[in-house]
Image: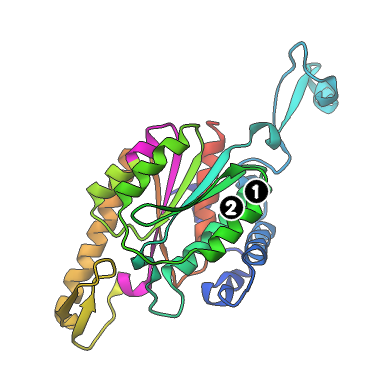
Amino acid sequence: MDPIERHNPVPGARFVDPRVLAKVGSLELLARTVVDGFINGLHKAPYLGVSLDFAEHRGYTPGDDIRLIDWKVYGRTDRYYIKQFEADTNANFSVLLDVSRSMDFASHGLSKLDYSKFLAACLTYLAHRQRDRVGLVTFDREVVDRIPVSAKHFEVVLHALDRAKAGRPGHLLTALRALAEHFGRRGILVLISDLYEEPEAILDAVKPLRFRGNDLIVFHVLDPAELEFPFEEPSAFEDLESGDRVPVVPRALRAEYRQLVQQHIATLTAKFSEHRVDYALFDTGKPLDHALFSYLGTRQRLSRVR
C-alpha cells in the first residue's frame, strides 16, 4: 500500500460526499471547494508530489541566472545551488473520460458519469494549480470531444466536462487506438471509465498509450449496485451497452455475480500492475477524498522520475 493511503480521510470529508456535490451548479466551484479543502486538511504540502512553487535544488553551472542561487544554502554549505521551480518541470496532463451509454447508470441518483465529471474536474484543477498543461478527451466507440493540452485550457476543459453526456455504446479499443497518435509526447494520462469490457480487451486498448512513454493512471468507476447486486425481485435486467434484456432471479445469482465482479477487478489489478499502470477502483457512493489520496500518491511517485 502506498504510504499516503494509510492516512485517515481528511477533516471535512462529508463536504465531498458526491450527493452533496451534485447540488453544486459550477464544476469550477466544485473543484476548487473539494481540492482546496482537501489540501488545507493535509498536515504537509509535499503530498502534492512537489510543492506548488519550489521544487528542488541542483548544482550551479556557468550561465545559470545568479538570481536563482539559494544564498541560505550557500551559507551552510559554501556551495552554489540553484532553485528549481515547478514551473520548470510542468507536465502534460489529460483526462480520458468514457461517455459511453453504460456510464449513465445510477442506482442512487448520481450516475457514474456525474461522479466521473466531478473526479475529472478536481484532478484537472489540481494539475492546473501545479502549473501543468491540462487537456481532455471524451469518448465512447470513437472520440466525441478533444481539448488539446495547454496551460490556458482549464476553463475550456470544465466547459467540455459540463456538456458531456452519455449516449452511444462504447468500444475502448477503437477509441483509444485513435487517440494514441495524439499522445506521442510523454505526459500523464488519467483514464476514467467503468471498464465495461473483458480484461484482455481493456489491456489491449490501453497498451498503445502506455507504450508511447505516457504515465497512465486508470480510475475504474462503478455504482454500488454494480458491486453488490442488492436487487431482490425477479425482473428483466438490461445490458447497459447493447440494450439486450435478460430475465434474472437476483437471489439465485447474487453470490455468483459478486464473485465474477471481484474476479474482474482482481484480474484488472494484476494485469495493470504487470504493465506498470496505476489502477484504482472507485464506488460512486463514496466521497472523493479517496480518489484524491490515490492520485496524489501516484503523483508523488511520478515526480521522482520526471
* Residue that mark 2 sits on: 124
The magenta span reads: 207-226
Task: Please give left or right for residue 255 compared with residue 64 in the image.
Answer: left
Could you tell me which secondary element the residue under label 1 belongs to?
A: helix
In the displayed structure, 90 sits above or below 155; it is above
Q: Which mark is residue 203?
A: none
Q: Quadrant of residue 256?
A: bottom left
* Spot occupied by residue 282 in the image (x, y as percentages of width and height): 42, 62
Residue placed at 50% from the left, 58% from the top? 291
Task: Please give left or right for residue 255 compared with residue 95 in the image.
Answer: left
Point out the image quarter for the C terminus: top right
Q: Is residue 224 magenta?
A: yes
* Spot occupied by residue 293 in the image (x, y as percentages of width and height): 53, 55
Q: Amino acid at mark 1?
A: His
In the displayed structure, 58 sits above or below 257; it is above
Is there CB contact under 8 Å for labels 2 and 1? Answer: yes
Front position in the image: 298 or 111? 111
Number of numbered discs on residues: 2
Q: Amino acid at mark 2?
A: Thr
Question: Can you name the residue that lies furthest to the top here?
Answer: 62
Mark 1 burial class by Cα count in 10 Å: few <14, some 14-19, many 20+? some
* Spot occupied by residue 169 in the image (x, y as percentages of width and height): 31, 62
Q: Is residue 7 visible?
A: no
Q: Marks 2/1: CA distance? A: 6 Å
Front position in the image: 215 or 157? 157
Q: Which mark is residue 128?
A: 1
